[in-house]
Image (cartoon, rainbow, N blue to C red):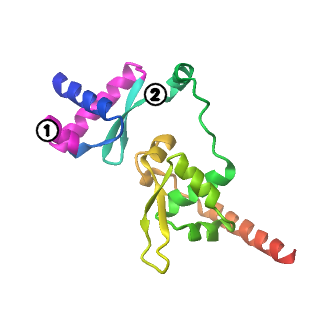
Amino acid sequence: MKELEAAVEAILFACGESVETAKIAKAIGQDTETTRKLIRNMMDRYEQEDRGIRIVELEDAFQMCTKTEMYDYLVRIAKQPRKTELTDVVLETLSIIAYKQPVTKLELEKIRGVKCDHAVNKLIEYNLVKELGRLDAPGRPLLFGTTEEFLRSFGVQSIADLPPVSQVKMEDFKAEAEEEVRMTLKV
């Protein structure tokens, strides 16, 4: 068992990005369920031992990462600027993409009521959003969705783990948007 764990650790460390469970299972000669249990046991042990690294599960894949509590130490070594903070506009755009994906820029602009080129470009730059392909419609507009980096950054395993949007909040947002449209038309 120790040899299998060491092999998984080596695979995740060397790859540096998420690796599908099936690929890990094939590499260590185990079935996916056994591999998943093995890795989850490793995840628990890493947490119990209070190590500087952890393994995160992202949909049906795993990745070795630095614990967020260790970022300050890494910044001191790497002398990199603080992590970029998302503005309200960018965060709002990201929220729409996360909940509506795949979504086109036109759909985003219809929901937000303003152009969103800058916000989408920033989200792509931060690797929180990516192009998923093109819609089979006139003009073949690009479709956008979230990335694994989004899942890691927001601490969820999959989009299904996002908190549900409250119907009351939705009604409040709708009323605010309608009021903004009325005010714009009066000017």
Asked if the residues shown at circle 1 and circle 2 are in contact, with their CB atoms under 8 angstroms apart, the answer is: no
Estimate how packed mark 2 is, as few (under 14), some (14 to 19) or many (20 or more) residues with alpha carbons within 10 Å.
some
The answer to which image quadrant residue 75 occupies is top right
Marks 1 and 2, how far apart in space? 28 Å
Percent across and percent down for residue 185 are 82, 77
The answer to which image quadrant residue 105 occupies is bottom right
Residue pictured at 48% horizontal, 67% vertical: 142
Residue pictured at 12% horizontal, 37% vertical: 29
Q: Secondary structure at mark 1?
A: loop
Ranked by sequence position, the earlier of labels 1 and 2 is 1
Estimate how packed mark 1 is, as few (under 14), some (14 to 19) or many (20 or more) residues with alpha carbons within 10 Å.
some
- Compared to residue 27, the image places residue 174 above or below, namely below
Residue sticking out furthest to the right: 187
| Direction from residue 48 to residue 183 in the image, left or right | right
Percent across and percent down for residue 78 are 53, 23
Percent across and percent down for residue 139 are 50, 77
The label number, if any, that marks residue 67 in the structure image: 2
> On the image, numbered disc 1 is attached to which residue?
30
- Compared to residue 184, the image places residue 145 above or below, namely above
The residue nearer to you, when weighing 124 against 162, is 124
Residue pictured at 48% horizontal, 81% vertical: 138
Segment tinted magenta in the rendering:
23-52
The residue nearer to you, when weighing 52 against 126, is 126
Q: Main secondary structure of the magenta part?
A: helix
Indicate yes or no whether the magenta region holds residue 32.
yes
| Direction from residue 44 to residue 87 in the image, left or right | right
Quadrant housing the N terminus: top left
Q: Secondary structure at mark 2?
A: loop
Inspect the image, locate mark 1, and give the three-letter code of the amino acid beneath it.
Gln
Indicate yes or no whether the magenta region holds residue 149.
no
Residue pictured at 62% horizontal, 51% vertical: 91
